[in-house]
Amino acid sequence: MPRAELYVGELLMKMVARQTGEISKVDFTPQKPAFSSLSFPDEQFLERSSPESQGVSSAFFTDLIRDLQADRECRMHKFMALRHGKVIAECAFEPFDMDMWHVTYSMCKSITGMAIGILMGEGKLTLDDRISDIFSPRVGPLSIFRKTVSVRNLLNMSSGVDFNEIGAISGNDWRKGFLDASFKFDPGTKFEYNSMNTYMLSAIVTEITGQSLFDFCKERIFDPMGIKRVFWESCPQSITKGGWGAFMRIEDMAKMGQLYLQKGVWNGQQLVPEEWVKESTTQQIETGREDNPYYGYQLWLNDDRPGCFAYNGMMGQNVFVYPDLDMVVVTNAGNSDVFQTSSMAIKIRDRMKNIIEVSDTPLPEDFRALTELKAICKSVSGRTADFPVISSGGWKNRTVRMTTGSTRNRSISFLGKRTDFKSAVNSYNIRNENQLIQRWLQKLDGKIYDLETSGIGFMPMMMQIVHNNFTDGMKKIGFRLAENGAFYIDIYEGDVIYRLRCGFGGKRYISDINMHCENYKVSLNTVCNRDEYNRLTIRNEIYFLEEASYRTLNIYFEDDAVDRVDRKSTFIHPAVPGRIEIRMNEAPGTDMLRDTLKNFSIEGTGWESAIISRFVKGGMKEAVAHAVNNTVQPVIYGTLANPDLPPYLEAAVSEGEAADTEDVTEDDPSFADAGGDDISLDEN
């Protein structure tokens, strides 16, 4: 494993040094297709029903969803609950969509376990089969001196093999890396969570059947269950990753939980052997974790209720199964949860353990409670109003969200030719504020800025590493105002342009970006405001709708007006800025990368090992952590590339003139009352 950790150190060093392109030891091949919003003819959908008809109160879910929404640490994307196989509560949190697939991370390990159970039910595999026998052509001549790892050890995470998740970025041949690795402990003596155990289970499916795990599951599990819109990444040798890399719709994730509640039966067909369902959900090994003390076969055994278990993926991708309640609770999120210890998991598990009450017979329909549940689900989805209004206080809150809602009348008074900024801005009514924003965006229309820092990608680092798809580096950023009022931010990265439509006032638009022939869907929540230096600021929350990652992209326009002789501009003097500042952040990400640095244990010989060890050990580790932090949260500066100034200003600027401009008065267009309808971006 020291060699693999060395490769991780090299990769982090390259990212910190802002190298771009194929910087990984793993060959990149485009895999991820674009999600289809159209359902397939043979796609199966679960029946919907009211909670009361299935013996649960609507108020229970109303309180839970409201609590999940109120806690920002939860970073909820989607929620669904089933009872008796019927959907009784579901909602997508703005801007996510219930119908779109979502990354599952380790949740799909449990599906890999199902495939192994099918092979065992057919007599093609046993728990005691040794992987050295299964992969005998790939095992070296010294294998007789190596410890024996069985299929059972892979299933219950007790292999002891020192080739873990880090190996996924250390080279192309993951099977060889696993088979040749050393051991941390004797197989079967200790629990250690290792995604490469699951990858080897996927490789076993391929070795036995000649099919990839994904194709095997499509034939034996997904197709019979009407699961059509699903995708699973593979390694460079075309072996399905097994322990991660799957994208599924939340309803199809819920089906996976329901399948085990039904003892492996779907529509009268035994897909997974009943005996395997029972065995895999039985305590197989102690984990040493207080939150999840036992592990089965590729799933966690929880102590919330008798017999309950979970398919768990990091950052909040969970399928909680409660057999005694005949219920399944499913989540997609973007929090910092690695196992089931996040605020989101605690809230759900506590309520399912201590608060929920169920009836074996239907409860009386409660129209008021059901209406409140529907209302909160609609509210968190952001689809409650066609025309969101500006928050109370207007400019006093220093935030304007574009809107077509009604305005409030305010009077404008001026003490002289120039009034102070605060009193001038506070005197504006909402209509003038929107008009001012519109003038700024018109000034920016068609402007492109060259970025002074290279090697920073639009995609979050976490996504780049997980998908082995690394940035070519952002080079330029541009702004466009379309004829229909839509405002776009164009990111020039490598040889492509990501055209991102901004969503003002809570309006949401989906932009498709293609990164090295892989398709990703993003949505921007955009707000125009001013910072403490009175600079125009366009703040963007960027949601990757199929992922758990989230990014902010805040753009500050410097007080450096190229279309004014005095080069001065403030928020109430719209102008063309000559320079911009960009601040980016991603979540989750920084903490996880910092934890990776803390756990480095690089040993061995060679100059590479010596250099990396020197940086990640001792006092230099803090410097590296700081550099990683600056890579995840970069500050980038840009210079206007195409000023396109009027001739008289071009001459004045070229001669270095700095003539004073006339003081602003009430006759200045900047203070003109807009009149008529409010200006609204993204109206169409």
Image: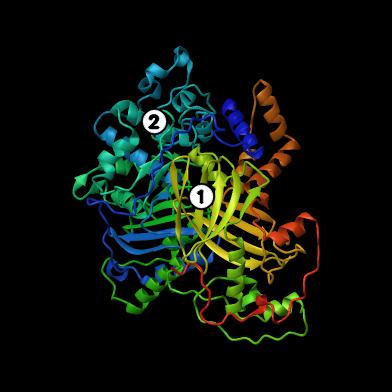
Nearest to the observer: residue 604 or residue 456:
456
Q: Amino acid at mark 2?
A: Ser
Could you tell me how far apart the alpha carbons at marks 1 and 2 are, in whole angstroms? 29 Å
Question: Which residue is drawn at the image coordinates 39% and 35% (left, top)?
Answer: 240
Q: Quadrant of residue 14?
A: top right
Q: Quadrant of residue 20?
A: top right
Q: Secondary structure at mark 2?
A: loop
Residue 98: x and y in percent read 38, 59
Image quarter in which the N terminus is found = top right
Residue 339 versus residue 540 in the image, above or below: above
Residue 254: x and y in percent read 34, 53
Q: Secondary structure at mark 1?
A: strand
| Residue occupied by mark 1 | 498
Marks 1 and 2, the one that precedes in the sequence: 2
Dot 1: few (<14), some (14–19), or many (≥20) neighbours within 10 Å?
Answer: some
Question: Which residue is drawn at the image coordinates 36% and 22% (left, top)?
Answer: 134
Q: Amino acid at mark 1?
A: Tyr
| Residue occupied by mark 2 | 238
Nearest to the observer: residue 239 or residue 80:
239
Residue 354: x and y in percent read 44, 63
Residue 385: x and y in percent read 44, 74
Image quarter in which the C terminus is found = bottom left
Residue 127 visible in the displayed image: no
| Residue 318 located left or right of residue 269 | right
Question: Which residue is drawn at the image coordinates 68% and 55% (left, top)?
Answer: 581
